[in-house]
Amino acid sequence: MSYEVLHFINGEEVPSSGSARQEIFNPATGDVLGSLHLGSQDELEKAVAAAKTAAKGWSELSLAKRTAVLFRFRELLVERTGELAELVVSEHGKVLSDARGEIARGQEIVEYACGITNLVSGRFTPQAATGIDAYSVREPLGVVAGITPFNFPVMIQLWMAPLGIAAGNAFILKPSERDPSAANFMAKLWKEAGLPDGVFNVLHGGKETVDGLLTHPDVDGISFVGSTPIARYVHETGTKHGKRVQALGGAKNHALIMPDADMDVVAEHLNAAAFGAAGQRCMAISVAVAVGEAAEKTIEKVTALARNIKVSNGMDKDADMGPLITPQSCERVQRIITEAEKAGATVVIDGRNLVVPGHEKGNFVGPTILDNVSPEMSAYGEEIFGPVLVVIRVDTLQEGIDLINSNPFGNGTCIFTSSGAAARTFSRKIKVGMVGVNVPLPVPLANHSFGGWNDSLFGEHHIYGEDGLRFYTRGKAITQRWPEPKQASGANFNFESRN
Ligand code: NAD
């Protein structure tokens, strides 16, 4: 049964006043599931106005009342995980257990935001000068918008909204057009949790809607997660219009494998990190940098595991990996594999032209391993965002570090080794935001912050954790004197000299 996805503004679903619509597909079957209403200027104005009004009341509410909403939201998220996960699988394609996993990771940020009373507490300095106390507080920005990618339709909005809302802001979510339903599902959960109307809104659309948010005078902050070219554009445009912007971009994550690593551990983890979610994770490992004799063993063992990956509809109980998001992604990934092959790479396992029985119209590419890749090939230069593991051979740890540091991205990386010295050298010298030691997907916990370096993040703040709270608030320093009635307050014409 086909459905329509409307906007969610000021506590209710509203259709677009314009006629622009976009089809929503099931990537495993190619079936059209429904139709998405794309926002016009009218809905943009309504959403911003609703958020602006709501932000005033919400920020005045006590921390206890705000926290109660967050706790209730967390409970609802737990209760409704199964339903939400199935919705994610139907529009995104990832396997059901992975969809449940993304909800669990997002839930961690909700739990962190439940501690807002502690997180937002300021500093107080009594008797900063005679009879004068000084204190610093952090106050909400007002209206903040979150623009999110397709690959984690639940988790990434939860990187943003819980902390933004807990800090006293109103939030407008502009989700990906490819899997938009999770946004409305979450809006209804927020409402059911007792969040006042207008504090969480969903505005659907593409570039025009994003541009509207980036330039609207009543939007104070923008959190963006997506590809690097758009992240750069969002950062440039938003800051030019006086907004605070954090924009997380794409990635090319390398795993460096030392010959002394436990090769069974390496194979198991590389297999999961490269091919999980069909490689459509910003922290997916897409390059294995094998040092010396590590190459042969790595390839042999990962290949053996990758051959047993079951590629199917994400709803199949025994599926390990689902489809890619669109037919265009499929074509792109297969084109890059072919280019690498023509340029001299060895295709160790070939996922091209995979047909899953019963799903002939699905966007499937199987696990692919490319050996003998050189840095000039598009398989190394481009973010593939598909189930392709590229192997580059180097002779030394230093050569591997230099290769990784010369890559324009700097999101995540890891080293596999049994040497503490190698791990320490790698961790200290590598120019990447998130580093794993024998941990291939080093996604920080909620109380740390998530963010890459170089072309993987534009702006000063990482997302969630301490940085997230700083992003969604601004500092105010208050200096106060309360003289007794008629007591001389000692006004000075000049700054007082101390020396
Ligand atoms: P995308 O950049 O195509 O889209 C992200 C958002 O930007 C969507 O909401 C989309 O509607 C909007 N958008 C697209 N084109 C636009 C334009 N021209 N102007 C303004 N807005 C536009 O990304 P995607 O394909 O949805 O997601 C995959 C990308 O996201 C990958 O590059 C991946 O590495 C990256 N990603 C990064 C992180 C991270 O934490 N760094 C996390 C997840 C995904």
Image (cartoon, rainbow, N blue to C red):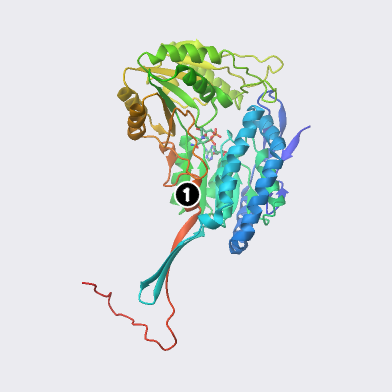
| Count of numbered tags | 1
Q: Position of residue 178 (x, y in %)?
A: 62, 34
Please determine whether, in this image, residue 132 is positioned above or below residue 416: below
Residue located beneath label 1 in the image? 466
Give the farthest residue toward the left.
499
Residue 345 seen anywhere in this rendered image of the structure = no
Query: Where on the picture, by quarter, is residue 423?
Result: top left
Give the farthest residue toward the bottom.
486
Q: Position of residue 374 (x, y in %)?
A: 38, 17
Q: Residue at x 46, y 31 (%)?
A: 251
Q: Nearer the viewer, residue 365 or 159?
A: 159
Please determine whether, in this image, residue 346 is positioned above or below residue 134: above
Whether disc 1's CB lies below 8 Å from ligand 1 is answered no
Q: Position of residue 158 (x, y in %)?
A: 58, 43
Residue 8 seen anywhere in this rendered image of the structure = yes
Q: Position of residue 11 (x, y in %)?
A: 70, 53
The C terminus lies in which quarter of the figure?
A: bottom left
Please determine whether, in this image, residue 279 is positioned above or below residue 202: above
Query: Where on the picture, by quarter, is residue 53?
Result: bottom right
Report the side of 252 relative to 64 (left or right). left
Report the side of 187 relative to 147 (left or right). right
Q: Nearer the viewer, residue 204 or 357?
A: 357
Tag 1 secondary structure: helix
Label 1, residues with CA under 10 Å away: few <14, some 14-19, many ≥20: some
- Give, as a three-letter code, the residue at label 1: Glu
The N terminus lies in which quarter of the figure?
A: top right
Report the side of 26 relative to 245 (left or right). right
Query: Where on the picture, by quarter, is residue 381?
Result: top left
Please determine whether, in this image, residue 5 is positioned above or below residue 91: below
